[in-house]
Amino acid sequence: MGADHTPLVLWPVTDTDPDTTDAALVSDLRRATGRFPRDSRLAALIRDLSAGNERFAELWATGEVTANREVRKTVDHPSVGPVTVDCDVLTDGDTELKIVIMTATPGSEYETKLQLTTAVGPPAGTRN
């Protein structure tokens, strides 16, 4: 829940290639631990994930370090239905701020649906 107790909008998202996405996210997290080696909350998160998630532990053990730059996902929007988007991740290396830009294939039904999501907005009683 948000600070104002309004439910967050959480729409189902499906990764087109979940194995690649999982590996990229874990690798990106490993990169963060290299940048912030004394961050106790980050270290605790890694311990908890490693102990409680076998898939995470396997991926963590590979030692791969990369940045999560792009992925394709399908968002199941409650008003317009499934929208397949390409997510490009831009990162400010100094602050670790990440901006995700979602685009759809030009001229596709997904491009139309993505444009519609801005017009219809979130369902009543939710917030972005």
Image (tube, helix red, strand yellow):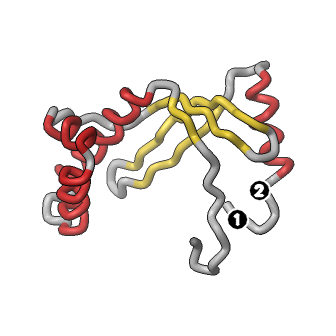
Could you say whether the residue bearing mark 1 is in a helix, strand or loop? loop
Pointer 2: what residue? Answer: 122
Residue shown at 37%/27% (left/top)?
20
Residue shown at 20%/64% (left/top)?
44
Q: Residue 60 carries which label?
A: none
Where on the picture, by quarter, is residue 103?
Answer: top right
Residue shown at 43%/30% (left/top)?
18
Could you say whether the residue bearing mark 2 is in a helix, strand or loop? loop
Q: Which amino acid does label 1 sit on?
A: Arg
Question: How far apart are labels 2 and 1 at the CA level?
Answer: 6 Å
Q: Which of 92 and 123 is in front in this view?
A: 123
Residue shown at 67%/74% (left/top)?
6
Q: Which amino acid does label 2 sit on?
A: Pro
Q: Is residue 35 visible?
A: no
Q: Which mark is residue 127?
A: 1
The N terminus, quarter of image: bottom right
Q: How many labels does the image show?
A: 2
The C terminus, quarter of image: bottom right
Would you say the residues marked 2 and 1 are in contact, meaning their CB atoms lie under 8 Å apart? Answer: yes
Query: Farthest residue in the top direction?
Result: 107
Residue 34 position in % (x across, y down): 17, 50
Q: Which of 38 and 46 is in front in this view?
A: 46
Where on the picture, by quarter, is residue 39?
Answer: bottom left
Q: How crowded is mark 2: few (under 14 residues within 10 Å), some or many (20 or more)?
A: some
- The vertical placement of 95 against 20, above or below, is below
Q: Nearer the viewer, residue 127 or 90?
A: 127
Q: Is residue 94 visible?
A: yes
Residue 42 position in % (x across, y down): 24, 61
- The vertical placement of 6 against 121, above or below, is below
Q: How crowded is mark 1: few (under 14 residues within 10 Å), some or many (20 or more)?
A: some
- The vertical placement of 35 against 55, above or below, is below
Residue 33 position in % (x across, y down): 20, 53
